[in-house]
Image (cartoon, rainbow, N blue to C red):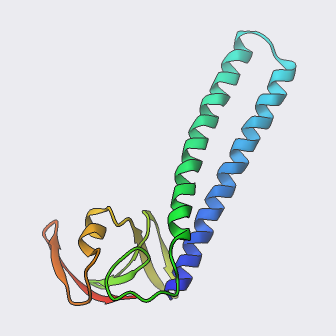
Amino acid sequence: MKHLVLLRYKQLIQDRIDVFQDMISGLTIDAQNDAKGSAGDKHETALSMMHLEQEKLNYKLKEILEQKNILDKIDGTAVHQKVGLGSLVQANGLLLFISTALPKINVEDKTIFALSPQSPLGSQLLGNAVGFSFELNGKTYLIESVL
């Protein structure tokens, strides 16, 4: 199941990369077309706005590429005894994928939450094994399984 979770998250990230690359490409084409037929203050303002939007998109693309790099480091077939990067952890009935902060997904009718090892919950789980319990924000968590 962990392998399917990893594949689904990799596809989600690749889809996001494709969308941002298409948006950046579209802005580049718009800016080139605008440069051919316009002059004056309105032209300069439009080009500046397109440039700012392109910078924002490039920043978001960079963040997504960093998430892809993290996912690429994970071996979907590895079985962990202790929670680490790439572990699929069941705690309090929740399925938690230790990777990077990503939206929840459904795999085989189960909801998976991807979280960063640096998150409050992720940092508590890291390095611990089945049977470990801890408290976070007034709630007690118990690691039920680690894959």
Up-down: is 135 above or below 142? above
**In the rendered image, which quarter is residue 96 located in?**
bottom left
Q: Residue at x 38, y 65 (%)?
A: 116
Give x and y (percent) for residue 45: 66, 18
In the depicted structure, whether residue 20 falls above or below residue 107: above
Look at the picture and state if 82 lies above or below 40: below
Residue occupying the point 33% across, 89% down = 81
The residue positioned farthest toward the top in the image shown: 40
Residue 60 percent location from the top left of the image: 55, 47
Residue 43, position in %: x, y?
A: 74, 17
Q: Residue at x 59, y 63 (%)?
A: 13
Q: Which of these two is toward me, 142 or 39?
A: 142
Q: Is residue 65 left or right of residue 88?
A: right
Dividing the image into 4 quarters, which one contains the C terminus? Answer: bottom left
- Residue 71 in the image, given as x and y percentages of width and height: 52, 69
Number of marks in the rendered image: 0
Q: Residue 128's quadrant in the figure?
A: bottom left
Left or right: where 35 falls relative to 131: right
